[in-house]
Amino acid sequence: MKRPIIVLGIGELGSVFSRAFLKNNYPVYPITRQTNIDELANIINPELILVCTAEADLQNALQSIPKQWKDRVAMMQNELLPRDWQTYNFINVTVISVWFEKKKGMDSKVLISSPTYGKKAQILLDSLALIDIPVHMLNSKEGLLFELVLKNIYILTTNITGLAIEKGATVNDLRNQHLDLMRHVSNDILALQAQLTGQTFDAKKLEQGMIKAFQGDLEHKCMGRFASVRLKRTLELAKAFNLSVPTLKKIESKHF
């Protein structure tokens, strides 16, 4: 009998992971806002705990994880970087950069294969394969960091540029009709990612990765429902680092 998997946050993506784990014969225990997590920790010894909350709820979720579970934590949020979990003394965390989406009333839609790294990565790969979601293993923390930055560049560039161009524009429109603006936005975002990680990254390689993701769904809309929130959060981070992000400021002034 396999040990259970805890899924913290049962939203759209949490439901996808839960289905995958169940298909892989893992019992699944959901944690919602009503769950007493410390009480649960006293009676369950899980294989892993997957944090599936929204980005805005991540820090509260990570703070709530009991000490006895800190060696089996996995995360899958957008805008995720090591600084988000490094203060919690987790041991050998597992992270997956999710390149599939799940919206209410529709099945999950894959853009490209999702990279994963960490102690429990094989479980994520094997389980998601059972519901036809491709995942591949990374072999280093450096590889994971690049993939997280790539996903951040993709999400933030498409969303924020979407605020400045025609309503309903797709990523195909973005690369074909607004390439200069796209590059200016992504350069600002990359400068911030460098500050947040203390690392430098190959801008050309990141752009190639972003274009590859575009090709996974050329009709994907640029401006998601959290675009304004993402712009505001990005500008607040840039301000905290006293970082100049001229294109993002220009988009803010026109949008608000």
Image (cartoon, rainbow, N blue to C red):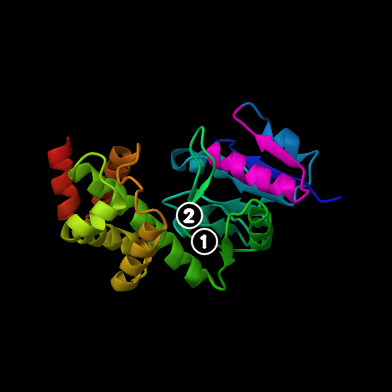
- Residue 14 shown in magenta: yes
Disc 2 + disc 1, Cβ < 8 Å: yes
- Residue 21 shown in magenta: yes
Label 2: element kind:
loop
Residue marked by disc 1: 113
Residue 179: x %, y % from top left: 20, 60
- Could you tell which of marks 2 and 1 lies nearer the N-terminus? 2
Q: Residues within 10 Å of mark 2 (few under 14, many from 20)?
A: some
- Residue 113 as seen in the image, left or right of residue 150: right
Residue 157: x %, y % from top left: 29, 53
Q: In terms of image quadrants, where is residue 216? A: bottom left
Looking at the image, residue 182 lies above or below residue 252: below
- The image's mark for residue 99 is 2
Outermost right residue: 1
Q: In terms of image quadrants, where is residue 121? A: bottom right
Quadrant (top left/top right/bottom left/bottom right) for the C terminus: top left
Outermost top residue: 34
Q: Is residue 207 visible?
A: yes
Magenta stretch in the rendered image: 12-33
What amino acid type is highlighted by mark number 2? Trp
Q: Residue at x 15, y 54 (%)?
A: 246
- The image's mark for residue 122 is none
